[in-house]
Image (tube, helix red, strand yellow):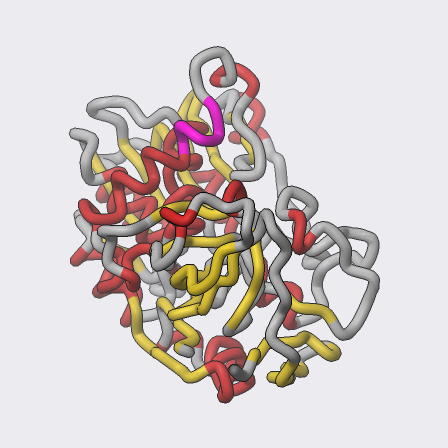
Amino acid sequence: MKNLAVYFTDVRKIEVREQRAPAIHEHQVLVQTASSIISSGTEMLFYHGLVPKEIPADENIPVLSRRPGYPFKYGYAVVGRVTECGKAVDPKWHGRLVFAFHPHESLFVADPTNLVDIDGLDVEDAVFLANMETAVNFLMDGKPMIGERVLVFGQGVVGLLTTSLLTQIPLSKLITVEPYQTRREMSLECGAQVCLDPSQDDFAGLAKGLLKGNRADLVYELTGNPHTLQQAIPLTGFGGRVIIGSWYGTKKEETQLNSHFHRQRIKLMSSQVSTLAPELTGVWTKQRRLDVALEMLPRVKPSRLITHRIPIQEADKAYRLLEQHPGQTIGVLLTY
């Protein structure tokens, strides 16, 4: 059986390589991939070479904990089926549909403790599990309250999932901001009251008008563009929170922390799914958060965000599409 894997071989260079089928040990299972999703945030930073070289691909995922240099495999959202079990593995795993934080690859071995059993879920909803967990984490860190005014900058996959979760809270206002029309339309489908184009004339004035002359209590910056932070701060009200979910890599932008920022006591808060906020660890665990994300998948049905399904053999096409035509894309899947 062919084993195809996606390799990053240089900046903006992708190769699909055929490898030997991996051998399993007694405590492992073999998984045949059904689909995987390309991250348009972190993964595209690696594609563009905008990640500091000393940083591992993902120190919290064993298979991605080292990045010695090109070539390397990346990706962290794969759905597949267990086709073989090692001698020491409970045979109940055989045939199970599973999710794995694993690079784009058609066959891989894993310890069952590193797999998420998703039997019973739709495959194309389940492939969004990592994105959904990130969105859940954004709500846990932002702590949106009933009646609050909320702004979400960025309506890519994670931004749209965050919007979808926020609609389940009785907010006073839920306004999103996105430059691409396809994503603005999807944002409205996901429940945003209004989705603004940040390039339109008097964007800030329009946003303040929609907030009834006020500013937002809670703002999410999920664009991956450091310039957006400069737009977000003036739209944040007294004591407001700005949750920075973007990772900018090596991208830089000057941010003016002016009198509005100081006098309005605005809080800039980082949010990263690899950990839990310290104040939550008394009652929350990463497993509990993952369980919530799993419960949200059939409720939100993120498969509606899929715009492209591309065979793994044409993976380079998928990355070029995300780079050159972002306005046409939301969820881009590799199929196997």
The boundaries of the magenta stretch are 285-289
Figure quadrant of residue 135? top left
Report whether residue 202 is seen: no
Where residue 200 appears, as percent x and y from the top left, is: 34, 64
Looking at the image, which residue is at 32% across and 34% down? Answer: 292
Is residue 100 visible in the rendered structure shown here? yes
286 is within the stretch colored magenta: yes
Residue 109 x, y percent position in the rendering: 57, 60
Q: Residue furthest top?
A: 282
- Residue at position x 46%, y 50% in the image: 222
Q: What is the count of numbered marks?
A: 0
Q: Quadrant of residue 2?
A: bottom right
Say left or right for 264 vs 150: right
Q: Report x, y in % for residue 260.
A: 52, 30
- In the image, 128 versus 78, the foreground residue is 78
Identify the residue at horizontal 83%, vertical 53% (top origin): 54
User: Could you tell me which residue is drawn at 39 percent across and 56 percent down?
Assistant: 94
Of 99 and 36, nearer the camera is: 99
Magenta span main SS:
helix
Residue 279 lies in the magenta stretch: no
What is the residue that sits farthest to the front in this orientation? 87
- Which quadrant would the C terminus be assigned to in this image? bottom left
With respect to residue 336, does 150 lie above or below?
A: above
Residue 282 to residue 100: above or below = above
How far across and how far down the image is residue 269, in percent?
54, 31
